[in-house]
Amino acid sequence: YEAGVEGTEFLETDTLAVNTSGFSEIKTLGASAGGAAGLSLGISNANSFIDNSVSARVEGVRLSNDAAEVAVTAADNSSIDSIAAGIQGGATSVAVNRIGNDIDAAVRGGQLNVADLQVQAQSDARIGTVSAGLSAGSTDGLSGSVSVNLLNTNTLAEIADGAQVVAQNNVGVLAGNKDTLEVFAGAVGVSSGNFGGGASLVVNHMLANTEALIAGPDT
């Protein structure tokens, strides 16, 4: 997702808006079921991956109007909802989810003499997952569930590369991150034999880089 203006001079322009938004949605169900008088085995797997690049850029632009309003915004609110479930004499469910988005809103170079300038980047990614295993049988019963969730986003809002900005009122450079993880993992093993057991493992990793900058000695 990309929106941009590059190397343009605007004359008698009151409003300049460069906006882009990304939205990806994945809903996944992985399931297995079976039964036997003896031992039955089943594996369910649900894997989902989103890697968006969302960019709004104003580069090398000239605009001189001290009544002009300029907004450069980029946002993404991707989501993954996944369910991995297994019901067997021996059941294993695995869910692996990853969102790794790059969101970039920037004014680079150029000259802006305006009333107000807003540069804003926002990430609102979400992963919701359920991973569950249920085993039941007349022999030994074992079940397991594994849930791995990776939420790694880069969010950048900047004025840089020698941009010359004069604002009569306000300059806002804003970067925000409201990424969320919602996870449930469980396993139950029931057996009329000698042994029944269940185990679950959850691995969550959130690594967000969120920056709002006015950068460079010539800016």
Image: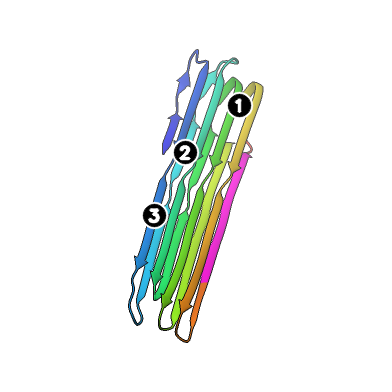
Residue stretch rendered in magenta on the structure: 200-215
Q: Is residue 213 magenta?
A: yes
Horizontal side of residue 27 vs 122, given as left or right: left
Q: Residue at x 45, y 85 (%)?
A: 193
Q: Is residue 18 magenta?
A: no
**Residue picked out by circle 2:** 55
Q: Residue 36 versus residue 69: which sits nearer the camera? A: 36
Q: Earlier in the sequence, mark 2 or mark 1?
A: 2
Q: Residue at x 52, y 74 (%)?
A: 199
Check the picture and name the quadrant holding the C terminus: top right
Image coords of residue 200 (percent x, y): 52, 70
What's under tag 1, amino acid-wise? Val
Mark 1–mark 3 Cα distance, whole angstroms, equals: 47 Å
Q: Residue at x 66, y 25 (%)?
A: 170
**Residue picked out by circle 3:** 28
* Mark 1 closeness class: few <14, some 14–19, many ≥20 residues within 10 Å: some
Residue 171 position (above or below residue 148)? above
The image quadrant that residue 93 belongs to is: bottom left
Please tell me the numbered disc located at residue 165.
1
Q: Earlier in the sequence, mark 1 or mark 3?
A: 3
Circle 1: element type: strand
Residue 35 position (above or below residue 127)? below
Q: Residue pushed farthest bottom? A: 194
